Structures are given as structure tokens and as C-alpha cells.
Image (tube, rainbow, N blue to C red):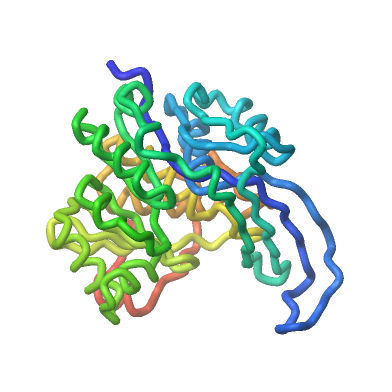
Amino acid sequence: MPDFDVVGVGLNATDTVILVPHFPPYAGKVAFDEEMMSPGGQVASAMVTCARLGLRTKYVGTVGDDLRGQIQMESLQNTGINLDHVLVRKGVPNQTAYIIIDRTTGERTVFWSRPEELRMQPEEMTDEMIGNARLLHIDGHDTEAVERAAQIAREHGMPVTVDVDTIYPGFEKVLPYVTHLVASQEWPVAWTKEKDALHALDKVQQEYKIPVAAMTLGSYGSLARVNGQVYYSPAFVVNCVDTTGAGDVFHGAFCYAVLEGMDVPDALEFSNAMAALNCRALGARGGIATAAEARALMARAERRIHPEFAGRYGHTAGR
């Protein structure tokens, strides 16, 4: 039996969160209400979600050796995640982000920086790091390294889930190894130049023979294509404080759903619920919930339905 349920390879970041009463107009200014430092990052936060859901979890990534890197490592050490293959870059600052949160909506604007020295290299990805798990989760930033990680995973028969919202050069070499693509709504359009997001998703799925191809739709939920069928799952309405990290938590929950053998509609519902619950608190990992809390929300909550996708495909709520 593998030592881990899930291994994640990809980004972490240490965020400075700044709360403002409202976002100012361009070139304007506004006094902020609060400032806090908060650990986050796509794959790192997804792995914290997996650990919170009870999975045996491992994180592979790079951190700087500055204060922000120390904060990130301390945040992960308290979760039970295996950090044996986190690579510390000496004399390099950690990836950082400044996140401006509009209190009126909970929406955030992100300014980020990652030193090139933090880039993972393909030769750093080894069988020992990747192969002893049931599932691999990646992002696309260090493209050659995650390509190698995905190749190792598929050699071991592991499913590979990917979180992608940016066009990365060379990412076409990663996609053939992906079994579960979960992209932002904008990514398939940007990747294929198709105007219709669902047609674009279909094109990516067909070209790279990806069994499950999904999109997150922000405050409107998520959808997925599998075996020619489209499933749309509306978002859950909660008292939103901060949307930072909602997508990362969605991805961690989706990894859990895959490992639990949920069908695609249930996986979308569960992941939407986990993402929504995280928005109730400040910070990328401020409101990560339990599976029981997610199921309770699924049973009672109001939904925010995307009229176009619900009209075209119906939706899974209340199935």
C-alpha cells in the first residue's frame, strides 16, 4: 500500500493580506482597515485541505530561507503534511503576494512575485518523491518539473489532477499525463482561442485525451465534461469575507473526492461546498472545513446559479 494518499507538487506563497473598506478607483487611494500575514499558494493550500479531510498528504515544493519562508514552513508543519522533500533555497526570498480584499464583497486583487531561483527543475523530481502515493496534484508554474512528476505518477498508474489558470509555455507536454483537468473558466479560451468556454474545454479534452475536464466558475460554481456529458454544479451562498484561496481549497477537495470514488457531479458539489466555506474567514486557508461541514452545507444552502450553464445543462443541486 502506498505511504501517501496524495502528493502535491507546486507553488506555495506567503501573503500579506490588506483589508480595505472598498477598492479605490484607478490612481486613487483609501485607508486600509487591517493588515495580516497569511500562508497560501495553490498546491500548498490544496494539500492543507487534503490533510484537513484526513488524507495522508505530502507536499513537494521550494521555499526561500527568509521570514516568509519560515512562516510558510511553520504553517505546514502544524498540519501533519509530510515535508521531507520540500527544497529550501538558501539566500532566496520566498514567493510572496500582496492581496487587497474589498470588505464590501470579499473579492480580492493579487500582486505577486516569485524569484526565479525558486523554480523546481525536472532532475529534482524523483521516483522516491512522487511514486509512493495514490494521486498526484500539480499546478503548471514550473512546467518541466511538473511534467516529470506527472510522468512518474502515470508510470505508477496514479491519477494526475492539475490546477491551471495561466498559459505556461510548454504546458502541452504536461497535458497528456493529466487525468483530471480543473482549469479556470478563462484558461481553455486563452489556450485554444475558442470564444465559447465549453467548446474550448471540449477541444482541450479531445486533443489531449483527458478523461475528466472541468472548469471553476468563481461565484457561479463549477462544471465538468466526462464521457461526452456535461455536469454543472452551482455555487453555494455563504457570508463571504475573503475569496482568497477558494480555488485552492476546491482543488484539494476535488483530490479527496477522486480518491473517495465520488462520481463527477458529487465531486463538484463537495468541492464547491468546501470552497464556499473557506470564504467565511480571512486568509487563503482561513476557513478550511471538515467533510461533515461541507455535507451539511450541501444539504441546506442556497445556490448561486449561472443562468447560461444551468439553462444549457441543468444542474446537479438536489440530485
x, y percent for residue 309 = 32, 74
Q: Is residue 21 left or right of residue 245?
A: right
Q: Is residue 51 left or right of residue 5?
A: right
In this image, 249 relative to 316: left or right?
right
Residue 266 rendering spot, x and y as whole percentages? 32, 49
What is the x, y in percent for residue 295?
Answer: 45, 44
189 above or below 45? below
Decide which of 318, 274 is in the foreground and name it: 274
Q: Identify the image quadrant of residue 63.
A: top right
The quadrant in which residue 216 appears is bottom left
- Which quarter shows the N terminus? top left
Residue drawn where x is 22% and y is 63% of the image: 204
The answer to whether residue 185 is above or below residue 24 is above
Q: Is residue 234 visible?
A: no
Pinpoint residue 303: horizontal percent, then vertical percent: 46, 65
Residue in the foreground of this view, choosing between 130 and 124:
124
Q: Which residue is located at x 30 percent, y 39 percent?
A: 148
At x 37%, y 78%, the residue is 307
